[in-house]
Structure formats: C-alpha cells, structure tokens
Image (tube, helix red, strand yellow):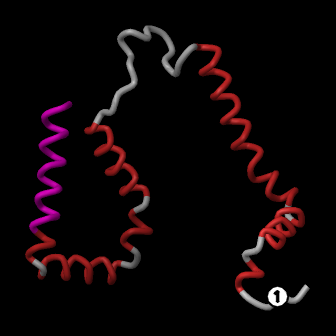
C-alpha cells in the first residue's frame, strides 16, 4: 500500500491496520500494566479505600514538602540525562551565572524549597 499524503498516514484505517499488525507486541507491553491496574482497583473496592489500617488518622491529602522531595529524588536519578556531558553542564552553569534574572530566580526557588522543607518537616 503506497501512502500519498500525511492525511492518509493518520487515517483511522491506517491506524487500525498498524494496531492489527502489531497486536501481539502491543498486548505483551500493555498486559503487565493492565494486571497492576486491575489488581489495585480490586484492592480499593475490596478495602473500601487506599488506606490500610486506621482510615480516620491516615487521610489522603496533598503534602507540598513531599512534592519537593520527589523533585529532588527524580532530579538526582535523572541527573545524567539533565546534565548531559560535563562540558554542557559548565556551559549551562556559566550562562545561568551571567544572567542575573535567571540566577536570582533559581536562588529564590532554592530558598523557598529549603524554607518549605524546614517549616513542614
């Protein structure tokens, strides 16, 4: 089948044909996720919620310092992707240091993060 234009490539017929051609590989990728989601949903229905144990004292809520912890943790794990090569890291550091607006914004965000962690933990 020869594709004439981009609209033919994005047509529902072409999408359906691609899914049908790769159905087993898509199923192998999606099945583990489906099992985890189904198991979790079954647990929530059976338990009456996400909490195990005392549901009164363990309410789900938004905890802003934990978002900060997550950002630090994710940044540490993804630092090789974020930083790249040492040369590009130092170029970025130099560019931030020369731009006073960016440097002050970074310092302000860092200070707010430290203050939130100190106050709420």
State yes or no: residue 33 in magenta. no
Question: In the image, 93: left or right of 99?
Answer: right
Figure check: 53 above or below 19: above
| Residue at image coords 72%, 40% | 34
Image-quadrant location for residue 63: top left
Image-quadrant location for residue 116: top left
Observer-nearest residue: 86 or 2?
A: 2
Q: What element carries label 1?
A: loop
Which residue position is annotated with label 1? Answer: 3
Observer-nearest residue: 27 or 13?
A: 13
Image-quadrant location for residue 22: bottom right
Question: In the image, 118: left or right of 42?
Answer: left
| Residue at image coords 35%, 11% | 57
Magenta segment main secondary structure: helix
Figure check: 85 above or below 45: below
* Residue 83 spot, x, y in % from top left: 36, 71
Instruction: Point out the stretch of residues depicted in magenta.
Output: 104-121
Question: In the image, 21: left or right of 91?
Answer: right
Figure check: 104 above or below 77: below
Look at the image and tell me in which quarter the C terminus lies: top left
* Residue 31 spot, x, y in % from top left: 77, 45
| Residue at image coords 80%, 91% | 4
Number of marks present in the image shown:
1
Observer-nearest residue: 47 or 1?
A: 1
State yes or no: residue 119 in magenta. yes
* Residue 53 spot, x, y in % from top left: 48, 10
| Residue at image coords 72%, 75% | 10
Look at the image and tell me in which quarter the N terminus lies: bottom right
């Amino acid at each position: 089948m020869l594709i004439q234009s981009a609209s033919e490539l994005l047509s529902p017929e072409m999408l359906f044909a691609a899914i049908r051609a790769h159905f087993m590989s898509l199923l192998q990728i999606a099945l583990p996720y489906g099992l985890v989601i189904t198991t979790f949903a079954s647990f929530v229905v059976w338990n009456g919620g996400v909490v195990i144990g005392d549901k009164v004292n363990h309410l789900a809520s938004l905890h802003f310092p934990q978002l900060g912890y997550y950002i630090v943790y994710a940044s540490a794990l993804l630092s090789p992707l974020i930083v790249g090569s040492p040369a590009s890291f130092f170029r970025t550091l130099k560019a931030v240091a020369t731009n006073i607006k960016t440097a002050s914004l970074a310092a302000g965000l860092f200070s707010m993060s430290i203050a939130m962690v100190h106050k709420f933990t």
